Image: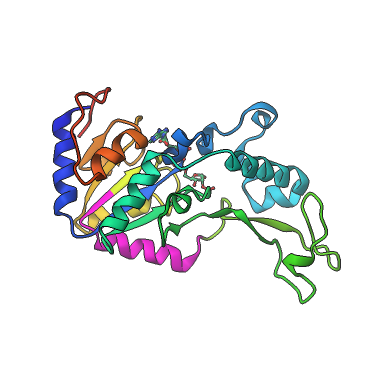
């Protein structure tokens, strides 16, 4: 890490009246949550997430897909927010109204770290909802247990409350994120491959509206060409340095820097 690049971004952050932060799976990697594309291990390695995280995949194999989500829910129970989640939550508490946190993650770790009003573009892994439009007989409290649980009267299946491929994002949340992207003076893009839209489009929106865009990622991402600065390091390593009140420069943070 080039400490000059870090210092430059620290200065940009200090002078930005509004900051938007877009996070992806990488922000939770150091909590022990596998990133979306690395998540398939053991039994689940034989399945492609892209095939299961769709309505079509769920309708074709509801038990299999439900069990995959249960497996991911269990993984989450054993993990904790890391220094990156905590730095974001602390910063927002110390600078009320200045930071808008937008996440593609469904793991709830930002909220568990203390961040309020997180804009969750892709839903919440721990929530359920009915697959088909609920009928009067469909009540979450009276579902019959099973893989997946279902309405005992009409058979309507429960599904995880996440956004699947091909589905629309929650409109009000997306619009709030787009407003934040247009309004901010600086957007931090942390731990995302930048391959999934409309989430990745927020970085373009911010740049087009005149904001500085800064990427925090140990590897190249598809959004690197959009950025004014690329900090090559991990989220838990860099966010405390960027957002801590008395941001101390490290002696060395390892790895080359881009810009
Ligand atoms: P990906 O799994 O596609 O990418 C994870 C990114 O995190 C990569 O760019 C890694 O280089 C980076 N990364 C890994 N470890 C990191 C660390 N310690 N600190 C910082 N960055 C790190 O995850 P997303 O880009 O979040 O959508 O995926 C976006 C969406 O694609 C997900 O929300 C999901 C998936 O389709 C839906 O489920 C709708």
Q: Nearer the viewer, residue 174 or 85?
A: 85
Q: Is residue 180 magenta?
A: yes
Front-lying residue, 3 or 134? 3
Q: Residue at x 27, y 23 (%)?
A: 255
Using the rendered view, name the quadrant where residue 176 is placed: bottom left
- Residue 24 position within the rendered picture, expressed as x and y whole percent measured from the top left: 43, 44
- Taking the image in four quarters, ligand 1 sits in the one at top left
Position in image of residue 76 (x %, y %): 58, 42
Report the magenta stretch's main SS.
helix
Task: Give the image's coloring scheme.
Answer: rainbow
Task: Name, please, the residue furthest toward the bottom.
Answer: 136
> What is the quadrant of the C terminus in the image?
top left
The residues colored magenta run: 169-187
Q: Quadrant of the N terminus?
A: top left
Residue 21, placed above or below residue 8? below
Residue 258 coordinates in the image, percent (x, y)? 22, 31
Q: Is residue 31 rendered to the left or right of residue 70? A: left
For the residue pair 60 and 91, the one nearer the viewer reads as 91
Q: Quadrant of residue 190?
A: top left
Residue 224 visible within the image: no
The spot of residue 133 in percent (x, y) is: 70, 69
């Amino acid at each position: 890490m080039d400490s000059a690049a870090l210092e430059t971004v620290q200065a940009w952050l200090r002078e930005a009246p509004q900051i938007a932060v877009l996070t992806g799976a990488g922000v939770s990697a150091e909590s022990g949550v596998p990133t979306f594309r690395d998540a398939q291990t053991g039994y689940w390695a034989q399945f492609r997430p892209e095939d299961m995280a769709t309505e079509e995949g769920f309708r074709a194999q509801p038990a299999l897909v439900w069990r995959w989500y249960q497996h991911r829910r269990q993984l989450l129970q054993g993990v904790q927010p890391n220094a990156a989640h905590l730095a974001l939550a602390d910063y927002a508490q110390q600078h009320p109204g200045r930071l808008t946190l937008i996440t593609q993650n469904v793991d709830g770790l930002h909220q568990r770290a203390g961040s309020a009003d997180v804009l969750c573009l892709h839903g919440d892994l721990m929530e359920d909802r009915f697959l088909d439009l609920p009928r009067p007989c469909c009540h979450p409290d009276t579902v019959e247990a099973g893989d997946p649980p279902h309405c005992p009267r009409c058979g309507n299946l429960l599904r995880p409350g996440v956004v699947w491929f091909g589905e629309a994002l929650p409109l009000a949340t997306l619009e709030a994120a787009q407003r934040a992207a247009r309004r901010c003076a600086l957007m931090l893009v942390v731990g995302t491959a930048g391959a999934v839209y409309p989430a990745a489009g927020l970085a373009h929106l911010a740049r087009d509206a005149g904001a500085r865009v800064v990427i925090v990622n140990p590897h190249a991402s598809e959004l690197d060409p959009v950025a004014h600065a690329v900090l090559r390091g991990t989220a838990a390593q860099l966010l405390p340095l960027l957002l801590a009140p008395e941001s101390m420069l490290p002696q060395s943070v390892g790895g080359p820097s881009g810009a």
